[in-house]
Amino acid sequence: MSIPSNINRFKIIKELGKGSQGVVYLAEDPHLERQVAIKLQKKNPLVRNNHHFMLIQEARTISKLQHPNIVPVYEAGEYDGRHYIVLEYVEGISLGILIKKKGAIDARESARLVSKILEGIAYIHEKGVIHGDLTPSNIQIDKNGVPRIMDFGISGMISLEKGVNRFPGGTPLYMSPEHFLQTPPVPQSDIFSLGLVFYEMLTGHPAFRAGNKSTMMRKIINTPVERPSLKNKTIDQELDRIILKALEKKQELRYTNALDMKKELDTYLDQDKKGGDIADTLQTDNRSTINFLLRRISHNKDFPTFSKYMIEINQKLSSKEKYLSASDVANSILKDYALTNKLLRLVNSAFYGISAGKITTVTRAVVVLGFEQVRLAAASLALFEHLQSKNQMEDLKNAAINSFTSGLLARNLAEKVSVGPEEAFICSMLYNLGNHLVIFYLPEEYKEIKKRMTQRGENEHTASHAVLGVSYNELGVAIASAWKLPDKIIHSMHRLPKGEAKSVKSEDDLLRGISNFSNELCDIISETDGDAREDAFSSLMVRFKKIVPLSQKELYKLFDTVKEDIDKYSDSVNVDLKGSDLIRRLTINIESRKGGTDSEETETHINSLDQKTQIFDSEPFPDSESHETIIDDESLHEMNGIGSTYASNESPLELLTNGIQEINNVLVENYDLNDVIIMILETMYRGFTFDRVIFCMMDATRKAMHARFGLGKAVDSSSKTFWFHVKESSDVFNLAISQGKDLRIKDSTASKIKPLIPEWYRKTINAPAFIIYPIFFNKICLGLFYGDKDEKGPPIPENLQNYMKILRSQMLLAIKKGR
C-alpha cells in the first residue's frame, strides 16, 4: 500500500513502523508546526459503528494524562474509513528494536528502565486507567535514555471507571492470564505484562514461545516461568525473585501495585550501587575482573561457604522483619540435604552442649538454639564443604581453617566488646572472602600471585593488584555486595588503616574492629615464631587497645578457649582441624606458655610431617555440582546406605520415631502451628526418603487446594503450580478428599491409574510414585500431605505406613490444641 501524502490536515513525512493492527507514520501538524506520530489502524468491516465514538472517548481520557514516562495522545479521528490517533513524536528507539539489535540488556540498566516505566504505570493506574497492551514495541527510549510508554494500540487502553469486565485486545506474547481467561482487567495485569517485557530485556528472548495463540494461551495460564538467571548467568537471585513475583499466575500473588514493585527494584538498585562503590572506583580492567568472576561463580555455584541458601539464611536473619518463625529459617537450611544432616549432628554435640534431649529436626534446632546460633552452625559447616579434589585444595583448606579460627576468636571476644557473638563470628569468618574466591575460582591467577610474593618479595596486596587488577580485599567486598550480603558484613570486611585504631561506638564499627583484630591475630600465629611472635602480639594489642582491650593473660586465656572449641568441633563433625598448620602453631603457643613442650623441637617435628595431611577423615565430603535442587541424587538414598560420610547414621525407623517423639514434645509446649507442619514435613522427607513433600491447605472458599509448604527437589517452582479445584471428579486428588481415603500410588503410568491422574499434575511434578493423605477435622477437609518419589514402587514401605498416620494425627492434635 502506498504512503498517503496527508491524513486529514497532517502532512505525512515517512513510515515509522508497521504491525498487525496498522501502520505508524511520522507527520507534521501544520497548525501547531510540530512533528507528531500517527497510528492509522487497518480497515475492519466487522468493527461496530460506535467504535469511532469509543475511540474518541478513550483519546479524551488518555489526553488528560501528563507524565514524563508517558507519550501523550493529542487527538483521534477517522480517515478513509479507518481510525487513527495522534501522539507526541518521541525521537529515539523502541525497546523492541533495541532488544533485537543488542539482545539481552545489562541487568542494572534493565532494572533502571523498568523502574521508570513503573512510575508511568503507577500514574495511569492512579488515574483509573489500565494499559492492557504493554509490549517492547509500545515503549520508546528517547534520546536521553528515558523510557516512555506509548499506546499505538489505543483500543487496548481500559478505563476502570467504565466497569469493563474483559480485555478488548492485546498482543498474545505479552498478555496476562486474565486476558485469556476473560476475567475483569486489574492493575496486576499490567504488572504481569511488564514482567514479560522485563524478562525479555534481561534474556534477549521472550519468556514463552508458541506457534499459535491457543498454545501461547495455555503456556501463559499453566506453564511456570523459568528463572531468567538460567538464560543469563549475570542475573542474581534477587532479580530472579522480583521478576517471578511479577509473573505469578494468580494475580493476588503478584505485586499489589506498580509502586510496590518499583520500591523493590529501587532497593535492588540502591544496594547494587552501594556494592558497586568499590568497583566504580576501579579502572575498567578491574571491573572486568569482578564481572568475570561473578560469571564464573554463576556457572559453578558450589563455593563452600556461599551456596545461595547460605546467603538466603544470612539475609533472612539480618532482615528488619518484626516476626521470623522457626519454619522460615528451617526452610532455608532444609534445602541443602547434606547441610541438614551435618547441622543436626553438630547441634547434638559437645560443641553446643544441649541438655534438652536429642534434637532430630532443624525446626526444633532453631527453636532451642535460636536463629543466630543456627546461622553460626550452618555457616561454619558450609565453610568446610566441597574442598576435595580441587586444584588448590591444600591452600583452600588452610584458608578455610584460618577463617573459621578467626571467627571463633571473634565469637569469644564479642562479649568483651559488647556485640553479638554470632554476628562477630560471621563477620570475622567472611573477612578474607576475596582470598577464598581467587583460590577456588581462579587457581592459575592464584599461583601467579603466590609466585610474585615468593620470587619478588611483593606483599599480597601488591601481587594481587598486579595479577588481577584488583586486591583480594576489594574483590571480596565487591562480590559480597553483588551477592547482597548484609551491610554490616560488608562493612566489617574493610581493612582498618595502619597505626592505632580509633575508638568506635556503633555496632557495625565494633564488628569491623573485632574482624580486623581476629584476622590479624591469626596472621601473626601463622607467619611468626618465637620472640617475633611475642612482639607482634604486643604490637597488635597496642594497636587495638581502644577497640579490643586485652591483657597478655587474657590473650592466652582466649587461645585456650578457642583451642577447646576447635577440639569439640573437630570431633563433632569428623573434620581434622587439629592437623592444620595454624592449629598446630596455636597449640605450640599454648603449650610453650605452660612449659609443656619445647617450641623449637616441636616446630622441627612439624616441618618434617607430610605436608599433604588431609583435613578430612578417611571418607571425603560428598561432591555437589549445584545447590540448584534441594536434594541431589547421591544424598537422596542416604538412609538406604548410599551417600556421604555425613549422612545420618539413623535408620528410616529411627528417623521417624525420633521425629515423632520430638513433635510430641513440642505439642506440650506453646508452639507455632507452622513450625509443627515443617517438623512433620521434615520427618516425612527424611524418614521416608521422599523426593518431595508438600503440605496443601484448603482455601477460604473451599473450592481449591493450594500448596503451603514444601521440601525437596525443585519444590520452590513446582509448589507454585501445585494447586487444584476441589470438585466432583474421578482424579486421585479429589477422590482422596471426597472419600476421605489415603492413597498410595506405586505407578502413575499404569493402565488403571493413568486415567485418574489429573492433567495439571502431569504438567507439574508428574512423579511415578506418590502418597495423598487428606486431613479431616470435624468431618471437614482442611488440607492434605503429599509425598513422592521419582522411581516406581511403593512410596512408603508397608512396615512404615502407620508412621504416616501418626504424623497426620499429630497435625490434627496441633490444630485441635490451637483452636
Image (spheres, helix red, strand yellow):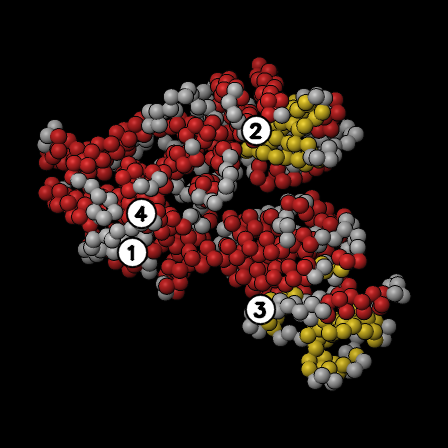
The type of residue carrying mark 3 is: Val
Q: Give the spatial CA distance, label 4 vs label 1.
A: 28 Å
Q: Give the spatial CA distance, label 3 vs label 2.
A: 49 Å
> Which of the two discs, 4 and 1, labels the residue nearer the N terminus?
1
The residue singled out by tag 4 in the image is: 510
Q: Residue at x 76, y 74 (%)?
A: 75
Per the rendering, the mark at residue 673 is 2
Give the structural element (helix, strand or loop) at label 3: loop
The residue singled out by tag 3 in the image is: 146
Reply above or below: 503 against 553: below
> Which of the two discs, 1 and 2, labels the residue nearer the N terminus?
1
Mark 4 neighbour class, 10 Å CA radius: few under 14, some 14 to 19, many 20 or more: many
Per the rendering, the mark at residue 464 is 1
- Disc tally is 4
What percent of the width, then of the height, locates residue 226? Answer: 59, 47
Q: Give the spatial CA distance, label 4 vs label 2.
A: 38 Å
The type of residue carrying mark 4 is: Leu
